[in-house]
Structures are given as C-alpha cells and as structure tokens.
Image (cartoon, rainbow, N blue to C red):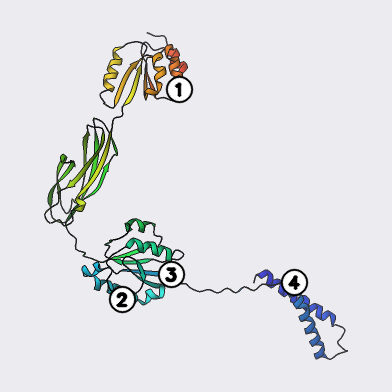
C-alpha cells in the first residue's frame, strides 16, 4: 500500500469521526453516556466505511524466497572409462560432490549420465558403447534454457558419435567445468602448431609460407622439417629443440611456375619416442593465377627515357607495359590499370578528361617538353610556377 493511500485512509477516519461527533453533539442530556458513545461509534463506522470505499485501497502481499541455481553433473557412462581404468576415479569424484554439504546448500544438484544419449540418472555402470558429447550440450540447452545451470562435465573426452563438441560447446550458454579422466603423463611430442599461407600466388613468382613448430619435452632433439608437393620434396630444414627452446617459426618461399591449384604437405619428422604423430603434418593448398597489371606509358613523341621506364617496370613479370600515343589510348582506357603520362601537352586534354571521368590511376612525368600552362590548367592539385628561365 502506498503512502498516499495510507494518508487518504487517515483523513477519511478523521472526517468520519468529526461527522459522527457533529451529528450527536446535542444528545448529551437526552441519552445515557454509554448509549451516546455507541451511536457515535456506529455512525463513525458508517461514514468511515463509505469513505473507505471511495478511497478504494489496494493491499499487495509480497513474499521473498531464495531460489538456488541448478548444478548439472554430466557423467560419461561409456565403456572407455573402464578401459582407461578411470571408473573408480569417476565414482570418487561424484561421491565427493554429493557429500559436499556447502555445495548442496548452494545448488540444486541434477545428475545425468550420457553415452549416445543424455539420461537423468545417478546409476553408473559404464556400459554404453558410444559417446556423444555433442548431444549432451544440445539436450541441456533445451532443458535449462530459462535458468542458470553450470555444467560439471566428467568424461575422458573420447567421442565416437555426433558432431565435433568443440564447436557445440562454443554456442552453449551455460558455464562448463570439465573434469577430464585419463592418463595425465606428459609424453614427448612434436607438432605443427600453425601454418600461415596466402590462398593465391602469382605465376612465375615465389609465395611466402610461415610455419610454427612446437616441442613438448625436456631433452634436446634433432629432426627435419620438410615440405612436399606430391612425392617431390620442395623444401627442407634441420630443426633442433630443447627444454628452453621449445618452439620455432620457420619462414620460407616456394616457387609458382604453373597456373592452377597445387597441394602441399608440411611434415616435421617424428622422433623415436614420440607416440602421437598425427599432429606432425599439415596439408595446405595454393592457387597460382596468371594476372598481370597492364600499364600504359602515354607520350606524344619518342624518348630514350620511355624505353628505360618500360624495361625497368617489366622486370616484374606481373607487369606489362604498352607505349602508346594520347589520342590512340582514349578508346582503350579500360584495358589498363595505370597510366604514366610522359611530358603531357595540349594533345593530352581529351585523355586527361577521360581519365578523370573514369577515376583511373595516373601519374605525370614532366620535362623540358612539358606544356606547363596546360598542366596547370588540367591538374587541380598541381601548380607549377612558370619563370621563363632557360
């Protein structure tokens, strides 16, 4: 009830009392004192009830209670837990959780087992022949979509069915706290951590490759890093790792002599005591394309500098230079990506307008034969002071 409503009720009581006293002010001698107060009280209640109906107070009852969040315990019930001799550890973890009084006071603990499907149960026999961790996250998302429910996932991580749970877990909205069952011994391991390459390379060029190698171990080891294209070795480098130098970044280039898509395989040769060799290789592909940049050197006359420019630019095989006159190139503007205007004069006016209209890339080379008055007129961002000195 609001403060305003309470104020109206108090005022109504005062008004009802005043009205009752006013009506019975002249009955002091004609009736007994007790009877008079009885009539005043009844009249007060009548007036107060009427005024209370006018005020129309509303009474709200609010109750508070603490709702504990859910804690989900999802236990891997597959036979692989027994195969890894982790069944006792799994049951021990569950017992420790269920016997934890502060934890039970803070959470509503829901227990599930899973193999190919998720089941609400606290009976564990490690008899399921398949493991689908992906399905665990999908089903829990539906069951607890409107509540806070962190998940304690007890598993060996070996999935035999369903989608890759690594990606499903990224879209799962509840916090996940995994308890991994298995061998915790750290073995010597070499792996290719990452390959960085461009998807495309230009013909008759060399494309860069970057490879990050990682070593897990304490002893100094020697091996070779190799790259193959089919059965042909295209790159090789000896590598040494130690406990203090356990990663290397290798940068090299490979040739691109033919057009097409070419597949490569990077390999770091395993050492004798290495158990996991799956991560010792990575494949990648590069598409070689033949795409040249067409450049037009536009001049109204011949000059030895033009030939020197052409020879220098075409040292890069991805660039092709055409020497052409200004009136001839107007109809071929879309055939070129860059225009070099050599000592322009009034014969370039149509070309300059066309290049500006098409927003083409261009740069100007000035010299003794350049018409500076023309250049000042057509180049808005250029202003050359003419002194007429020789």
Q: 349 above or below 238?
A: above
Q: Which residue is mark 2?
A: 95
Asked if residue 218 is positioned above or below residue 74 in the image, the reply reads above
Answer with mark 1 or mark 2, whichever residue precedes in sequence: 2
- Residue 277 can be seen in this image: yes
The residue under the point 39% across, 12% down is 370
Identify the disc placed on residue 54: 4
Q: Earlier in the sequence, mark 3 or mark 1?
A: 3
Residue at coordinates 39% horizontally, 59% vertically from top-left? 172
Taking the image as shown, residue 8 lies to the left or right of residue 275, namely right
Bin the neighbour count of mark 3 within 10 Å (Cα to Cα): few under 14, some 14-19, many 20 and up: some
Residue at 37%, 21% (x, y): give it: 339
Residue 185: x percent and y percent?
Answer: 19, 63
Q: Position of residue 82 (x, y in %)?
A: 23, 70
User: Is residue 61 shown above or below 343?
Assistant: below
User: What's the distance in space between the residues labelled 2 and 3, CA to CA?
Assistant: 20 Å
Q: Nearer the viewer, residue 308 or 325?
A: 325
Q: Mark 3 sits on what residue?
A: 69
Which residue matches tag 1? 356
Secondary structure under tag 2 reads: helix
Q: Between marks 4 and 1, how big is the CA–CA gap?
A: 82 Å
In-front residue for pair 194/122: 122
* Image position of 5 (left or right of 110): right
> Could you say whether the residue bearing mark 4 is in a helix, strand or loop?
helix
Res. 386 visible in picture: no
Q: Earlier in the sequence, mark 4 or mark 1?
A: 4
Earlier-in-chain disc, 4 versus 3: 4
Cα distance between the residues tagged 3 and 1: 68 Å
The answer to whether the residues at label 4 and label 2 have Cβ atoms under 8 Å apart is no
Q: 283 left or right of 148? A: left
Q: Secondary structure at mark 1?
A: helix
Q: Work out whether mark 4 precedes mark 2 in sequence or the reverse, and give the earlier one.
A: 4
């Amino acid at each position: 009830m609001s403060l305003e409503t309470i104020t109206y009720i108090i005022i109504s009581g005062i008004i009802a009392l005043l009205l009752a006293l006013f009506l019975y002010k002249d009955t002091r001698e004609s009736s007994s004192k007790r009877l008079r107060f009885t009539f005043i009280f009844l009249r007060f209640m009548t007036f107060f009830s009427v005024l209370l109906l006018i005020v129309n107070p509303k009474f709200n009852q609010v109750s508070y209670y603490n709702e504990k969040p859910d804690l989900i315990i999802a236990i891997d019930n597959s036979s692989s837990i027994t195969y890894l001799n982790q069944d006792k550890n799994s049951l021990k973890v569950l017992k420790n959780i269920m016997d934890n009084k502060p934890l039970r006071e803070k959470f509503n603990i829901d227990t599930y087992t899973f193999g190919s499907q998720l089941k609400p149960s606290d009976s564990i026999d490690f008899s399921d022949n398949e493991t689908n961790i992906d399905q665990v996250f999908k089903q829990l998302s539906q069951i607890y979509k409107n509540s806070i429910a962190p998940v304690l996932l007890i598993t060996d991580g070996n999935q035999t069915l369903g989608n890759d749970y690594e990606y499903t877990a990224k879209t799962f909205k509840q916090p996940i706290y995994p308890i991994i069952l298995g061998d915790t011994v750290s073995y010597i391991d070499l792996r290719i951590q990452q390959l960085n390459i461009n998807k495309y390379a230009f013909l008759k060029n060399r494309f860069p490759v970057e490879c990050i190698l990682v070593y897990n171990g304490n002893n100094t080891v020697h091996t070779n890093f190799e790259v193959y294209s089919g059965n042909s070795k295209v790159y090789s480098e000896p590598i040494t790792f130690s406990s203090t130098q356990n990663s290397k970044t290798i940068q090299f280039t490979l040739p691109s002599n033919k057009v097409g898509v070419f597949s490569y395989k990077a390999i770091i040769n395993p050492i004798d005591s290495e158990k996991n060799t799956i991560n010792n290789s990575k494949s990648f592909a590069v598409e070689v394309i033949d795409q040249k940049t067409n450049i037009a050197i536009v001049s109204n006359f011949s000059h030895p500098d033009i030939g020197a420019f052409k020879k220098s630019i075409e040292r890069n095989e991805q660039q092709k230079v055409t020497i052409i006159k200004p009136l001839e190139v107007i109809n071929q503007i879309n055939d070129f990506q860059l225009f070099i205007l050599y000592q322009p004069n009034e014969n370039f006016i149509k070309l300059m307008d066309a290049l500006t209209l098409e927003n083409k890339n261009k740069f100007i080379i000035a010299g003794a034969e350049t018409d500076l008055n023309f250049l000042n007129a057509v180049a808005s961002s250029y202003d050359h002071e003419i002194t007429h000195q020789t």
